Amino acid sequence: MISLRHIHKRFGAVTALDDVSLDIGTGEVIALVGENGAGKSTLMNVLYGLYQADSGEVLVKGQPVRLRSPRDAIAQGIGMVHQHFMLVPTLTVAENVVLGREPSRWGRMDMDRACQEVAATCERFGFKLDPRARVDTLSVGSQQKVEIVKALHRGAQVLILDEPTAVLTPQESDDLFRVARGLAAGGRTVVFISHKLREVLSVAERVAVMRRGRLVAEVRAANTRPEELAALMVGESRVPLAEAQTYHPPGGEKLLEAKELRARGEDGRPALQGISLEVHAGEIVGIAGVDGNGQRELAEVLTGLRTLEGGGGNLLGGPLTGLTPAEARRRGVGHVPEDRLWRAVVKAMTVEENVALGRQTQAPFARGLQVDFAGRRERTAALLKAYEVRPPDPEVPLQALSGGNQQKVVVARELDAGPKLLVVVQPTRGLDIGAVAQVQAKLREARDKGAGVLLVSLDLEEVLALADRIYVFFEGRVTGTFTRPEFDEREIGRRMLGTHGEEVAHG
Amino acid sequence: MGERLRAVLPSVFSVFLALAVCWVFIALTRDAETATGAYLQMLRGGLGDWAQYFESERLTVLTRPLGEAAIKAALLLLTGLSVTVAFKVGLFNIGAQGQMLVGALAAAVAGAQLQLPAVLHIPVAILAACVTGGLWALIAAGLKLARGVHEVISTIMLNWVAVSLVDNWLSVGPLRAGAGTHLSITGTAEIATSAQLPRLLGEMSRLHLGFPLALAVALAIWVWLSRLRSGFETRAVGLGSEAARAAGIPVVRRTAQAMGLAGALAGMAGAVLVLGTEYRYPGGLGAPYGFDGIAISLIGGNHPLGVALSALFFGALRAGGTRMQLLGVHKSYPELIQGLALLFVAGRLVWLALLRPRKVAPVVPTRQPETSPEVPRA
Ligand SMILES: Nc1ncnc2c1ncn2[C@@H]1O[C@H](COP(=O)(O)OP(=O)(O)OP(=O)(O)O)[C@@H](O)[C@H]1O
Ligand SMILES: [Mg+2]
């Protein structure tokens, strides 16, 4: 139904797409995979009219079309959910969905009708969303549903999802896949980009593999194994193996001792309802839980970004109460936040300026009251090289990097500061398998050098792979603690859902 | 380099387009000859009458007009910088006019009431203006930080408060020259000679110390924003305040500092006006340099050096505008040109789209204007 023919796209010196041709049929789920910076988002942005190809054409139902803006694409029945959401945080779900085509009465927006319409769309496709909820009070997973509903509401026949599962729990991912298959069965097409090869193979019928701007392979999912796919992506059969896990008994001092923490979430509801936990030097402590059970707020409290309303404790030799972001950094807390573009980086600034963020007053980023340009350039260049960020150019604006490469910059920056306690939330979000392995190795390395790591991830597999100890969160409380090697996946899952019977575990 | 050029082009094009539109306008209402003649007069008025100079060898035909241009440019530059500095921290300072007004009055009072040697008197009077303007701007910053009042609203309202306070009361009431007598003078008392900004070319031009001062300030602001730690932090706050907060940057302090500095710069413009040319606070300060600052800043791309160029250009244009009257063309055309140029710059997204070469896309994608409702998050 849709054909991309010989698409070329360059950004300055970078060739993002090099003669890419791809057919997208009706009623199929097709996946697009490839390393960070391979050109997946760029290709889909061309299809969505956000970028114009330098050459090549797009055919819809055999007819060449000009897609000069998303408006054109939407008119052709193409909808897209971006890697970085494009919602207006202060508006409600319904308002966001109908934005630009609001139902009106007497020239005023008809809120009731908007809500009804949106509720109907949600109902039809099986989404549970409150049309009147403000978007900034929703979890990332729910925000994504809003994006999908928005596209469907506009009549998308082809739905492009750019790394939709990077932010979802396994449960939510399964839901999403059900939706995707349902849409395909109903004659729509779903194109989705992902780095999680297993899920790619389980949901898609066809997989297109990109490498450095080229489409290098198209395979049927049914007869492909993840390893084969990975090999196609990196272009050689060197696929990083998961490291064998051993338990690291907490070797050192107590870095964090939190007692009965209480705090409210963005929406004013109590998010932490008496959380107690400890992190020692030389261990990775994982927080497992379904999104929205207090993990985000815990990370914010520990980094001074959220005020504590009750409880307290000790963090790196100082009180937890009254902690500010500057003070947290001074004590040696590193932070990889969940919401990258909002909280971790300033996207309009250059890569090197972003690397300086957080350490802007220290060597090698400053000399006295001045910015140390040479030192900053040198350090940034070294980090970009070490983390294989592409392009390794300290001077480009951060927003010119692909999503995965932006994340690498953030992780590199935080680890480079030599933190004593690292609070990382979804550290491998959006990274390709090679980069995931690399970042996980770096986290282990930091631990082995004596740092404490608090790992919050919605990906239980990641928590199981990395953590030495696990706290399970449910509704702002700790519902279980586990120590390697006694990780009981099913028990952890039950406690994440709060369905572990009468006995209450103590953290 | 190509990038930087592309950032400058929209402003340059906008200015030329504005010049062309006004030319057509004059040509339509009068005729093409008058339009061209008026532009030539404007050029002579702004950049000096070079033809006459080569004929008569009289230097003043150059120095007079150039001096006037420089004086205007100094004021435009300071108010333009005021808007720029606020912009860098993410605030839109519509209030440079009010800040300039209170600053001008403070300079007039300090200039008239104090008796000091010139080396002290001038700095003290300027400082008084800066502090007053800065405090005036800090009201808006305080409202924003404490109560979330949008600075556009508060600075506009503070402009009116400043007009009422200064023009409608203080300068015609308690601070009027000869208050308490029957003399019907408006405006404050004349400042002491020791507070007058020295003329740099003596009798040959009105050019005074304010011009090099403004240039030096522009340079200092540029150095601050681009080379100093605190300038970096300020820009980070303006471009991503949550990321700045998470990085441990004192967001509140940086915001207040930048807004205070913005007010101080506008106040300094008031001081330059009073100490350089008016020599007192006249009854009702007509000159809307504070509002001009918005246009100057935006046309200058909110970059201190760009703002300097834009101020020099429009200073010359404005100074030359008076000479258009020789041909019966109204002297407000330069302001019209400035306004149109602003309009075209504001449509710069359109420019960027038109300029985008087919093969190479801009490395910096369209920078969203501050007011864009589509704030992508997450
Ligand atoms: N606006 C831009 N300006 C300059 N370069 C860009 C821009 N957008 C993308 N690029 C470059 O194009 C290449 C492809 O980027 P793209 O975002 O398509 O990668 P991706 O496959 O989606 O990667 P990821 O998995 O990390 O999201 C990268 O090298 C990136 O740096
Ligand atoms: Mg991408």
Image: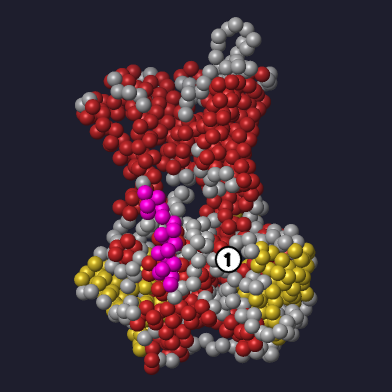
Residue nearest the observer in this picture, A129 or A226:
A129
Q: Quadrant of the N terminus of chain A?
A: bottom left
Q: Is residue A388 above or below residue B24?
A: below
Magenta highlight: main SS: helix
Q: Is residue B335 above or below residue A132?
A: above
Residue nearest the observer in this picture, B202 or A206:
A206
Queried whether the magenta region covers residue B61, the answer comes back as: no
Where are the magenta residues, as a range? Answer: A104-123
Residue A415 in the image: x percent, y percent?
62, 71
Based on the displayed image, in which of its 4 quarters is residue B246 positioned?
bottom right
Image position of B160 (left or right of B342) = right
* Secondary structure under the numbered disc 1 in the rendered image: helix
Q: Is residue A248 above or below residue B310?
A: below
Residue B348 in the image: x percent, y percent?
37, 48
Residue drawn 40% across the image and 79% down it: A180
Residue drawn 40% across the image and 86% down it: A232
Image mark 1: chain: A
Q: Residues within 10 Å of mark 1 (few under 14, many from 20)?
A: some
**Residue most toward the bottom?**
A223
Based on the displayed image, in which of its 4 quarters is residue A443 positioned?
bottom right
Residue drawn 73% across the image and 70% down it: A274
Q: Quadrant of the C terminus of chain A?
A: bottom right
* Residue A431 in view, yes or no: no
Q: Is residue A337 above or below residue B249?
A: below
Image position of B131 (left or right of B157) = right
Residue hosting label 1: A379
Residue drawn 72% across the image and 79% down it: A282
How are the colours assigned in the image? secondary structure
Residue A494 in the image: x percent, y percent?
63, 84
